[in-house]
Amino acid sequence: MKIIIYPGSFDPLHNGHLTIARTAKKAINADKVLFLLSPSTVWKKVDTPFKHRANMLKMGINGEEGFEISLVEEKNEGKTNYTYLTISKLKEKFPDDELFLLLGEDQAEVFDKWMNPDEIAKNATILVYKRKGSTLSDYLKNRFNMQEISGSLRNVSSSAVRHFESLDIPSSILEYIGQNKLYFAYRINKLLSDKRYFHSFEVAKLSRLIAIANDVDALSAFIAGFLHDIGKEVPKNKTERLMNEHFPKFLDLPSWSHHQFIGSYMAENEFLIKDKVILDAIKVHATGDKKMSQLGKVLYVADKLDPSRGYDSSTLIALCVKDIDNGFVEVLRANKAYLEANDKKVDNRLTQACFNTFLK
């Protein structure tokens, strides 16, 4: 049996990892890909607890034929971890199988600097996944009898996921990150109560769902959804100061609407979001306005239709998934009907302009 050993910290697993594993498995007709979860490496410090990374890895490979996880290095957490020792253990476990150690180009290029690299190469064929058209030194290939395969590489990294710059990950892992407040979710949670945090997370997921169905950028939708209420629990004195300094033309609006402007400011200055479309969507997510981008519509309806609000919004969600333009109008219509039924007047010019523009 051919077994590919794919080592990594997987912090977290992303779709690029899965693409590499699928390509490598097919290239050498392997029977199994063993994702070797490393607690840490000589080259890189890992802060995320092993158990969280293991849980996400299990979720991410679930349903993939021949994909398994190895926790053989779990007891090494907090210690210096050497691959040659692990490969020796795996060789003892699979004495009659052909082992392949899957490395990326960057790892392969410094393989001779690893601890006991010749011993590793004796127990497992070094399989190097490289970009098409790139080359590896003849010295390394010949010394360690490396076998090269090439394939596509997705524009994603674990670091980009952790820093809210990419969400090219399985949905199950995205859910886990939000539920366990990891990475970017941890930063958002520090600004919000638990109730407000989980509302924001639900809005983010619903925004992403509606965006995907309507060809709106899913990452932008998720970011806008997750950050839309970060101005909600800012102290009153700070809110007043920021409104006076940065949003004086909106001071006439009711105080309940000020959080959308503060949220836009915080998204730009604390989370370093520079995309004006995202910032503008956050800025009018509660009131609406006469000009609404597609992303703005997505965020507006997702906030209003969040299932955790406690009413059945499934019919309106389905309309928005089918067509965000028509769905947005129906959500506005429902919102206006609710206000009228409860003898509530529209108390701000932005919402009135939104109704006048889209409810003709």
Image (cartoon, grey):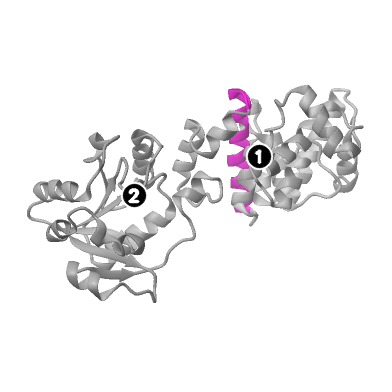
Q: Residue at x 17, y 56 (%)?
A: 120
Question: Which residue was labeled with disc 2?
Answer: 43
Q: Secondary structure under badge 2? A: loop
**Percent x, y for residue 50?**
34, 36
Which numbered circle lies on residue 270? 1
**Percent x, y for residue 221?**
64, 47
**Left or right: 100, with 346 as reference point:** left
Q: Which of 98 and 82 lies nearest the eye of the viewer?
A: 82
Q: Name the image quarter holding the N terminus.
A: bottom left
**Percent x, y for residue 331?**
75, 40
Residue 284 is covered by the magenta coloring:
no
Q: Residue at x 59, y 46 (%)?
A: 209
Read off the magenta span. 192-213
Q: Is residue 178 visible?
A: yes
Q: Which of 178 and 157 lies nearest the eye of the viewer?
A: 157
**Left or right: 73, with 213 as reference point:** left
**Left or right: 296, with 122 as reference point:** right
Residue type at mark 1 is Glu
Which numbered circle lies on residue 185? none
Magenta portion: prevailing SS class: helix
Q: Secondary structure under badge 1? A: loop
Q: Residue at x 35, y 47 (%)?
A: 61
Q: Which of 126 and 110 lies nearest the eye of the viewer?
A: 110
